[in-house]
């Protein structure tokens, strides 16, 4: 089912959440191939854009194969956030600009950015309205339900973003204090959705195709946003997309399929960032791809020791052969 964010058509209801250090162009293109309707870039600092930081600029690269794509920005001051949004609007290939109001980590919050805004619906309105006034591309907002269980202004903050001109809203069903612990509160998400007229993306604890369907049916979300469940597991995206469309459940990937996709993602990362940086960054990804395959600990450790694509590939190939030999016995 297609839906709209402003004038941008999203081909299905599966959205990949922005994840710091993860959702680079290599990951996003892979996610697209596995059925994601919309992918969101890892969050970008407004100050990084203002200071023309080379690493920050590189993070905003958009591959032609990943549209529609959203670039997420964060910042604490109106002036720098607006300037950063204008840069994304005028100088990148992004289709959508997303404002982060959900990041719970201290180094972001203490700059008066990320989840800090959840304490003040007026601040939400002010920041979003300044950005929407300054850009042509549609603006979306990603937020959490609240700061902690005593400060949940989910509905007020969501309505403030809508009033300020946001074209869609994503909400993670946890508070800032929860970080990634406990359970996502889908009841709050349902409440928020019922108050909004703009499209709503529900996020938090969507780990299976059945979870995704419940998010649409019970919460009423227009789309599901999947984050950590897609780490080393882009198959969840095709599983969810197929299940929502046909009701059919696709089988889990084999170890060989997992490793083939891991190597493809590494290759894309090498093309994007160069071999040295890519192989180091890929170590975390390799651990996710190997998760759940028996006897993977030594392979994970071996990947951490090497710094060329060839060496990583050889280690992973050897692991597949050993795994398949064990399975055949």
Image (cartoon, rainbow, N blue to C red):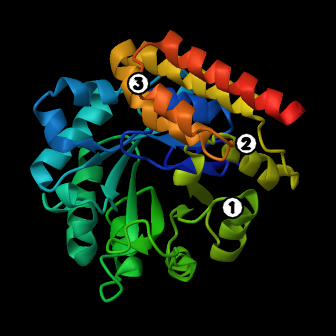
When asked about the image quadrant of residue 235, the answer is: top right
x and y, in percent, of residue 52 in the image: 14, 27
Mark nearer the N terminus (2 vs 3)? 2
Residue under label 2, please give it.
238
Q: Nearer the viewer, mark 1 or mark 3?
A: 3
Question: Is residue 194 at least partly visible in the picture?
Answer: yes
Q: Where's residue 48, x and y in %?
A: 17, 36
In the depicted structure, whether residue 310 falls above or below residue 45: above
Residue at position x 44%, y 32% from top?
Answer: 283
- Tell which circle, 1 or 2, labels the residue nearer the N-terminal end: 1
Q: Which residue is mark 3?
A: 305
Q: Is residue 272 left or right of residue 128?
A: right
**Placement of 138 over or under 185, stated as above or below:** above
Mark identifier at residue 212: 1
Query: Do tag 1 and tag 3 residues touch (Cβ < 8 Å)?
Result: no
| Local crowd size for mark 3, using a 10 Å CA cut-off: few (<14), some (14–19), many (≥20) | few
Residue 5 vertical placement versus 283 (above, below): below
């Amino acid at each position: 089912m297609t839906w709209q964010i402003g004038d941008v058509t999203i081909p299905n209801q599966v959205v990949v959440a922005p994840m710091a250090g993860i959702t680079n162009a290599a990951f996003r293109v892979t996610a697209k191939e596995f059925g994601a309707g919309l992918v969101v870039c890892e969050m970008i600092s407004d100050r990084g854009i203002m200071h023309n930081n080379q690493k920050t600029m590189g993070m905003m690269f958009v591959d032609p194969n990943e549209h529609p794509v959203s670039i997420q920005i964060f910042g604490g001051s109106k002036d720098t956030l607006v300037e950063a949004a204008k840069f994304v609007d005028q100088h990148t290939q992004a289709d959508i600009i997303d404002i982060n109001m959900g990041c719970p980590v201290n180094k972001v919050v203490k700059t008066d950015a990320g989840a800090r805004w959840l304490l003040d619906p007026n601040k939400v309105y002010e920041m979003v309205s300044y950005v929407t006034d300054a850009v042509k591309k549609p603006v979306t907002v990603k937020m959490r339900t609240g700061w902690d269980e005593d400060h949940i202004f989910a509905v007020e903050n969501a309505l403030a973003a809508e009033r300020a001109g946001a074209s869609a809203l994503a909400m993670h069903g946890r508070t800032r204090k929860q970080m990634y612990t406990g359970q996502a509160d889908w009841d709050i998400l349902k409440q928020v959705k019922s108050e909004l007229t703009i499209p709503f993306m529900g996020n938090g604890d969507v780990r299976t195709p059945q979870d995704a369907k419940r998010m649409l049916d019970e919460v009423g979300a227009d789309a599901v946003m999947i984050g950590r469940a897609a780490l080393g597991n882009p198959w969840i995206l095709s599983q969810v997309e197929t299940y929502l469309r046909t009701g059919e459940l696709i089988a889990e990937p084999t170890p060989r399929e997992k490793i083939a996709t891991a190597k493809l993602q590494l290759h894309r990362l090498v093309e994007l960032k160069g071999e040295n940086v890519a192989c180091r960054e890929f170590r975390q990804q390799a651990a996710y791809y190997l998760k759940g395959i028996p006897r993977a600990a030594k392979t994970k450790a071996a990947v951490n020791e090497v710094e060329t694509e060839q060496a990583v590939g050889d280690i992973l190939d050897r692991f597949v052969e050993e795994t398949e030999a064990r399975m055949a016995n």
